[in-house]
Image (tube, grey):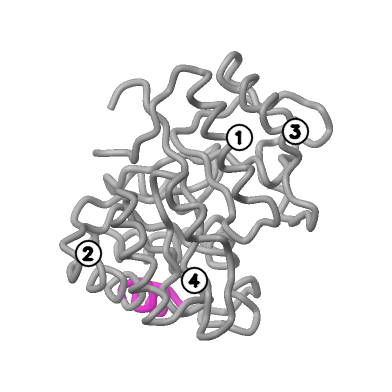
Amino acid sequence: MENSFDINIDCGESLGNWIMGADEELMPLITTANVACGFHAGDPITMQRTVKLAKENNVAVGAHPGLPDLIGFGRRTMSLTPAEVYAMTVFQVGSLKAMLECENMTLHHIKPHGALYSMLSKDTSLGEAFCQATIDISPKPMIYYPAPVEQHAVTRVASKMGIHVVGELYFDLSYADDGSLILKRANEGADLVDTKNRLANFFETGVVVAESGVGVPLEAQSICLHGDGPNAVDLAKTIGQGLRDAGYNLSPLNI
């Protein structure tokens, strides 16, 4: 859809009686959901409930596979072979895909979580395994990755293999001068006034302001926010209004 922009969240990360994220409040405010697949977070009931919630709100659903590390929330690097990355990706995405099919929904995309994302960004052989899994399990292979997408080993591989790569922006994280994300999470949440100003500046100039004040040119089709952020709902409202003010419709991406 022309003149449209996507807002995606990482969600479905609750586990049993432990609640993570404001999924129910956020779902009406976004267009695409990255649902945890049980390795770094989530469980079968949570996956099912999250898929149903997305369907009720006309939100497209993608898989958010991670490392098998519930205690570390998938944020601790592991030593894995390409064969292991391939198998664990198919396993996780396949589980979510089955949940979607039970609701007559289609898998929209795949987006790796946490340390898996970092590992794929650096290791071409692991990236190739992940991309092959994406092609083998997806109806229309598409992956989400932080802009600039050419910065990551896996996205360079994905482009060569014919996978559509969606570049993301973040406003609840900071940027380094080279456009890479500074992976620290602020307990106080995102600054909403700063978010509004940075978002408007991006649509006017194509530039995101780094933590140092340097302007970084980026291309993106989606904005990601973390559903477990302390002011995630207000941030989603701010971003949605900022997109509408810039003349964009909110819509999931189609290929």
- For marks 2 and 3, the one nearer the N-term is 2
Q: Amino acid at mark 1?
A: Thr
Residue 66 tag number: 4
Identify the residue at the far top of this view: 204
Judging by the rendered image, the residue that carries numbered circle 2 is 136
Q: Secondary structure at mark 2?
A: helix
Q: Secondary structure at mark 4?
A: loop
Mark 1 Cα-neighbour bin, 10 Å: few <14, some 14–19, many ≥20: some
Q: x, y percentage for residue 135? A: 25, 58
- For marks 4 and 2, the one nearer the N-term is 4
Judging by the rendered image, the residue that carries numbered circle 1 is 238
- For marks 3 and 1, the one nearer the N-term is 3
Tell me how far mark 2 sits from mark 1, CA to CA: 37 Å
Q: Is residue 2 left or right of residue 193?
A: left
Judging by the rendered image, the residue that carries numbered circle 3 is 210
Tell me how far mark 3 sits from mark 4, CA to CA: 27 Å
Please identify, in this view, whether the residue under mark 4 or under mark 2 is nearer the observer.
Answer: 4
Q: Residue at x 57, y 82 (%)?
A: 69
Please identify, in this view, whether the residue under mark 1 or under mark 4 is nearer the observer.
Answer: 1
Whether residue 19 appears in this view of the structure is yes
- For marks 1 and 4, the one nearer the N-term is 4
Q: Residue at x 29, y 53 (%)?
A: 108
